[in-house]
Image (cartoon, rainbow, N blue to C red):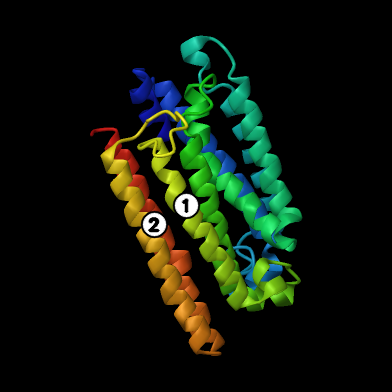
Amino acid sequence: MSALNCALFMGVTLSYYQILLLILTPAFLSTGTMFHNDITDLESDKINRPKKPVPAGILKEKTVYYTGLTLMIGSIFLGTLVDYMDTGALNWECGLFTFILVVVGLYYNYYGKHHGLVGHMAVAFGVGAIPYWGGLAVFPNQPLLMLPLAVAIFFLETGREIMVGAGDYVGDLKAGFKTTSVRHGRKRSVQIALLFYLLFIPIFPLSSWDWAGIHMPQVFGAVYLIGGSILAASLLLTWFFTYRVVIKTDDEKRIWKSFERYERVGTRVMIIVFQIFIFLEIFY
């Protein structure tokens, strides 16, 4: 979607080949890193999500490991070829960026998740890179096109990762993961997450409304602003509902359900809604 919006902004039409690789490459990348995440999350998942394929024994660890590794290597290869059929040149910028995302993903899976805020930021970097990757894949010489949206999503996702980690507090504590909630307690970590949610609000408009006067490309329009405003409001609302449960009860089951309902599911649904608004920008 970010690539399509960038193409419209630059007055360029994407080929079917580009669109195919714009879909396949991130799919390979995200699936591969998530496969490895399921391996490193195994001890926590045995407690928090025992019905997932790996802790349930449906899939073997070695199968998941090597499949994930193959997909990640494939994503780097495909990212380098994303424009080859149209320009006859390799997109080294996109290939290198994809490689960086693989490294960051592996860092999080095998090290970052044990080290609090840095681990959450590693995940957020990967999520914020999604729109940035799309712009870079099509326009490697225009690195600012998706930068404001990428930075805004980075802050949003850092807050969301802290919140999700707070929901998984019991399992992560038993598994020895040093998440923000394990280090600082659930209540304090939820308060820290709010700060990152608030940082999303002034940054996301810069791709459509340059209120700061820093001359960022105005890739999006009013539809994007509406979608972003709805997302910002929903982040604050779901945070409030979750925090209210945390401060009112010590019932772990009730707390876990509130995090699952509002932070894992609720925010994910609203992010999808935001993506729909970005998609609608293509036709606006």
Q: Position of residue 271 (x, y in %)?
A: 40, 53
Judge whether 262 appears above or below 8 on screen: below
From the image, which quarter does the N terminus lie in? top left
Judge whether 156 appears above or below 46 on screen: above
Q: Residues within 10 Å of mark 2 (few under 14, many from 20)?
A: many
Q: Is residue 138 left or right of residue 121?
A: left
Q: Secondary structure at mark 2?
A: helix
Residue 27: tell me if it is visible.
Answer: no
Q: Position of residue 63 (x, y in %)?
A: 68, 51
Query: Which residue is painted at 42% across and 30% down in the image?
Result: 3
The tag on residue 200 is 1
Viewer-proximal residue among 130 and 199: 199
From the image, which quarter does the C terminus lie in? top left
Residue 141: name its quadrant: top right
Sequence-wise first label, 2 or 1: 1
Q: In this figure, which residue is indicated by the disc labeled 2? A: 232
Residue 158: name its quadrant: bottom right
The amino acid type of the residue labelled 1 equals Phe
Q: Are marks 2 and 1 in contact (CB under 8 Å)?
A: yes
Q: Secondary structure at mark 1?
A: helix
The tag on residue 189 is none
The amino acid type of the residue labelled 2 equals Ala
